[in-house]
Amino acid sequence: MSDHLRDYYDLLGLSRDATPEEIKRAYFESAQKLHPDKNKVAGETEIFLNVQQAYETLSNATRRAQYDATLPPTAQTPSLPYEHKLIYSRRNLGKIDEPQMLYAMLDLDAPQETRRASSSPLNVSLVIDRSTSMQGAKMDTVKATAIQVLRNLRPQDILSVITFSDRAEVVIPAAYHLDRARLESRVQMIQPSGGTEIFQGLEAGAREIMRSLDPKRINHLILLTDGRTYGDEQQSLALATKLAEQGVGISCMGIGSEWNDIFLDALSTRAGGSTNLIVDPRDINRLLLEKFNALIQTYAEDAVLEVKPVTGVELSRVFRIQPDPAPVSLNEGKIRLGPILQDTSTRVIFEYIIQPTEVQSGELTFMDAALKVTIASHPFPVPSLRLRLLRPVSSPSNPGAPPVEIQQALSRLMLYQMQEQAREELKKGNVEKAARHLERLATNLLTQGERSLAQTVMFEADSIKKNQSLSEEGSKRMKYGTRMLFLAPPKKELAQ
């Protein structure tokens, strides 16, 4: 047995100071993946027995102390099956009498040697709104794309298709699909009718995913809708939280302009996913196929930061820049950063506000967190990475110019924030301020060559002045349009 396997902490993906609860949770996660009743892969039964021995030792205080005494006095950092890089916006913090802003950027990448490797099999539930408003080109395109997805499945993939209106129906149950012609006819028979109750579809989709839930698969739910749900939002969000705890991701696609973007954003980010705007029904095919391709290219299905609070330091904003640009929420000390793809970095920027009372001599720790990455193709848990980020304190301050990567990210973030600020001012009744934010945004978009989006923003600025409100379509175009700018190549600087 290798040295790595003899280290019980590494086997369970734990640090040497792991709590009894962390040891128990790590063992449960490993057992789910490796238990011989569910896993017949050669060699992994032995790994399961090693994991079991590790748990029996570390869960007993006396045995653990005896085992710890046999380890080297200084624990080596275990090798990680992914690459990570941190960049800071400033070299140091200054001893000044006002709050200071600090940005940190985290990049996560699949190792070079795995970027062309075979990816994990899928367990995907496609949940389709079939309410009356979906009739016509929208439903025709959704059905044609679902059939194309079905035809593109690999033999090892599992797909379920759910439709919902005011009730849900399992069109294709979760299984390996051999008789695809028969299943295609089922998809063709989908007919729009009824209202929109998203929880009905989510619940049915969740049941199908749970039937084939497997830590060695990419478990994911994709929701397509063009309407608003009423009265079941909290049920839906609670279900999204439960799915996230089971390692199930959620992606949402809103078609047209009548759906609730705030709700779908909250739904997807609970599970580290994202929401896309589909303006033209003809884009359904492209975006849905792109989503399935991204799932096939997934290396690690989940990266979660467990963050401890730091006195005098506020984590004011977290934003995922790529692969799917979106704000990331902090929920009960956990930040779900999303998946790591084989060919694209997962890049996240953190915005901190640091109070002057905490900036003393020496160094200031502004993040104390553990990064936990889940990789379906790995036979045992990935060790946690301790992230204790700090900056030196100096007087006078000499922060230096921010690195180019952070400058570019902040220029895009500023554009996104302008339309968010306009919404906030509009909520407060400050119509003139809201309009000015959008006019400034439009100017910057024109400077960067984004003429179409700039025209949309100017239309919304006029709408605010005349109607004291944003249009449904223009509001979504601004929100998701400025997010997608993060994926565009850098252009000119912002106009001040």
Image: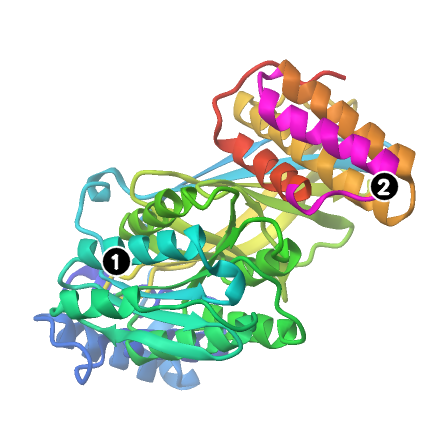
Is 420 on the left or on the right of 222, as rendered? right
Query: Which quadrant of the figure has residue 465?
Result: top right
Q: Between residues 398 and 374, which one lies in front from this camera angle?
A: 374
In the rendering, at what x and y percent does residue 85 appear?
Answer: 44, 37
Query: Which quadrant of the figure has residue 307?
Result: bottom right
Is 318 on the left or on the right of 75, as rendered? right
Label 1 environment density (alpha carbons within 10 Å; few <14, some 14–19, many ≥20): some
In the rendering, at what x and y percent does residue 254 appear?
Answer: 53, 53
Residue type highlighted by circle 2: Asn
Seen at 44% across and 78% down, the residue is 168
Q: Between residues 227 and 37, which one lies in front from this camera angle?
A: 227
The furthest residue to the left: 42
Does residue 76 appear anywhere in the picture?
no
Does residue 46 appear anywhere in the picture?
yes
Q: Between residues 19 and 479, which one lies in front from this camera angle?
A: 479
Q: Earlier in the sequence, mark 1 or mark 2?
A: 1
Residue topped by disc 1: 147
Q: What distance separates the C-alpha of mark 1 from that of mark 2?
A: 43 Å
Secondary structure type for disc 2: helix
Q: Look at the image and say whether residue 176 sits in the magenta stretch.
A: no
Q: Which mark is residue 467?
A: 2
Label 2 environment density (alpha carbons within 10 Å; few <14, some 14–19, many ≥20): few
Q: Which mark is residue 392?
A: none
Specify the quadrant that holds the C terminus. top right
In the rendering, at what x and y percent does residue 430 appear?
Answer: 91, 40
Vertical order, 162 against 61 (above or below): above
- Dominant secondary structure (helix, strand or loop) of the stretch shown in magenta: helix
Vertical order, 221 against 467 (above or below): below
Q: Look at the image and say whether residue 458 sits in the magenta stretch.
A: yes
Q: Which residues are magenta?
A: 448-473
Specify the quadrant that holds the N terminus. bottom left
Residue type highlighted by circle 1: Ile
